[in-house]
Amino acid sequence: MKIEPMINSDSAIALLCCPTCGGDLRALNDSSGSAEALHCTSCQSHYPINDNIIDFVPDFQPSEGLAQRFMESPLVVDVYESFFRPAFTSLGSTIKYQDEDQWLDALDNQHGLTQVDVVLDLAAGTGRYSRKMIDRYQPKTLIAADLSMPMLKKHQEISKGLGYDEMLYIRADAHHLPIKSAVVNRLNCFGALHLFPAPAQAIKELGRVAADTAVLSCLIACEHQSPIKKRLQAAFSQLASFHFFQRDVLQEDLENAGFKQFENMQKQMLMMFSAVKPTNSDN
């Protein structure tokens, strides 16, 4: 496996586990000595490595849901960061990229985040937040995870072109993360949690992989207060497999996953929120 230059392959693989059984993984090398797959030492599951992307869901087929099919479309992927994402966001809120960046800066200042060892960018898309977190934290390992292989390939293309070589790319299901428990110090999932079929399970997984004092940041779609718009949201949810969060339910899901200190800022149909995984003594 051609792990990027700033990541030691042994230390990177040591953070990962089999999503099927939770077992340890070892690299299977080709004739040149580069790993071509990861192999579970417990259940014998096999995970191929293609173009430096570890594929933990090699048999995945895009669902019938409109949202995931969009994320797999090359046409959408090519313009996702520059056009599709900001255009879609503008339909439900006045929040723009600049607002997101300012909010994340304030979050860093609030929690004194400067250097962080292990970062997970879940549903990393084409890498906007992965690159920002590399700049912010200079992590030993940044895991860029997404279910869409086209998104991850575009992430690599853009990031490498800009000189960002220090990432570990994994194709993974957010409901069964191939990451060991309590190893991630900073978690981010901006603009995707509402696309997951079972968001409470994904939040539970984020809580499992989060280390003590880890900070989580998310941007999500949330339920509007207007009864008419609530009905429109319900109709759209059925069409596009899209989830609009209720604040109280979200906070309960976070607490069930072990997160505390829930803080949020909502503008119309979008919310940015943060939460912290406390130490055992704080529980």
Image: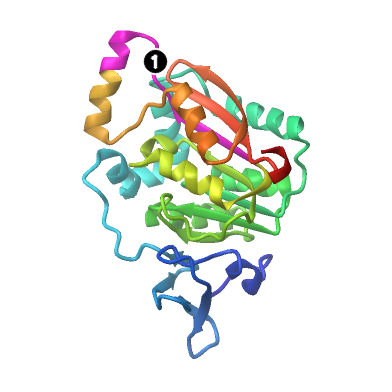
* Above-or-below relation of 122 to 223: below
Taking the image as shown, residue 73 lies to the left or right of residue 112, namely left
Estimate the x, y position of residue 182 in percent, counting from the top left.
Answer: 62, 54
* Above-or-below relation of 223 to 72: above
Q: Residue under circle 1?
A: 224
Taking the image as shown, residue 38 lies to the left or right of residue 209, namely left
Which residue is found at the position 28% from the left and 36% from the top? 241
User: Where, by quadrant of the figure, is residue 150 drawn?
Assistant: bottom left
* Residue furthest to the bottom: 31
* Above-or-below relation of 51 to 96: below
Q: Nearer the viewer, residue 94 or 43?
A: 43
Q: Nearer the viewer, residue 167 or 220?
A: 220
Q: Nearer the viewer, residue 275 or 150?
A: 275
For the question of whether residue 46 can be seen, the reply is yes
Name the residue type under label 1: His
Which residue is found at the position 60% from the left and 59% from the top? 167
- Is 108 covered by the magenta stretch? no
For the question of whether residue 124 can be seen, the reply is no
Magenta region = 215-231
